Amino acid sequence: MLRPKVPTNPAPTGIVTPLVVEPTSITQHTPAPVPVAPAPTQPTVQLTPGALVALVGGGTAVVLVVGAVLVSMLLAVAITGVSLAICALVIRSLIASEHKRR
């Protein structure tokens, strides 16, 4: 009564043709040599005095902005730490004074 029944596959209804695989030949292909470009005689990047001033000014601006962001983050952490320390001292003082009253 509780035995599983194994399903049986029905017979195919159409014409079944066998699949024939024919071997293919393997051919070796050698790549053609890639032409090498001659090395440039002049440097790729030429810095003019105006470009050099702009580069130094941009680098200075980036350093100042990153420094300001890092200093403000450090200041925020320091202020938070001091605030937590003051809160802890006040709470400890309140608890100690509550025990002295009893």
Image: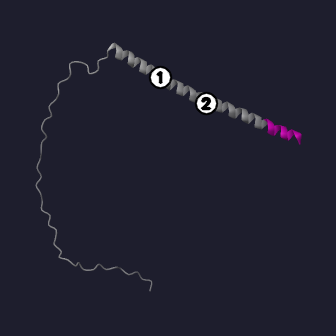
59 drawn magenta: no
Compared to 38, does 24 lie above or below? below
Q: Nearer the viewer, residue 23 or 35?
A: 35
Name the residue carrying label 2: 76
Left or right of 61? Residue 46 is left
Where, by quadrant of the figure, is residue 59 drawn?
top left
Q: Amino acid at mark 2?
A: Ala
Question: Residue at coordinates 12% horizontally, 57% vertically from top-left?
Answer: 24
Q: Position of residue 99 (x, y in %)?
A: 85, 41
95 drawn magenta: yes
- SS under mark 2: helix
Q: Position of residue 40 (x, y in %)?
A: 21, 22
Q: Amino acid at mark 1?
A: Val
Quadrant of the rendering where the C terminus is positioned: top right
Name the residue carrying label 1: 63
Where, by quadrant of the figure, is residue 88 drawn?
top right
Compared to 5, does 84 lie above or below? above
Question: Residue at coordinates 14% horizontally, 31% vertically from top-left?
Answer: 35
Left or right of 3? Residue 79 is right
Compared to 18, does 50 lie above or below? above
Number of the label disc, if any, that sits on residue 73 = none
Quadrant of the rendering where the N terminus is positioned: bottom left
The stretch in magenta equals 93-102
Question: Residue at coordinates 32% horizontally, 15% vertically from top-left?
Answer: 48
Q: Position of residue 8 (x, y in %)?
A: 31, 80
Q: Main secondary structure of the magenta part?
A: helix
Where, by quadrant of the figure, is residue 15 drawn?
bottom left
Label 2 neighbourhood size at 10 Å, few (<14), some (14-19), many (20+)?
few
Q: Nearer the viewer, residue 35 or 73?
A: 73
Q: Are marks 1 and 2 in contact (CB under 8 Å)?
A: no
Q: Position of residue 53 (x, y in %)?
A: 38, 15
**Which badge, 1 or 2, is on the more N-terminal residue?**
1
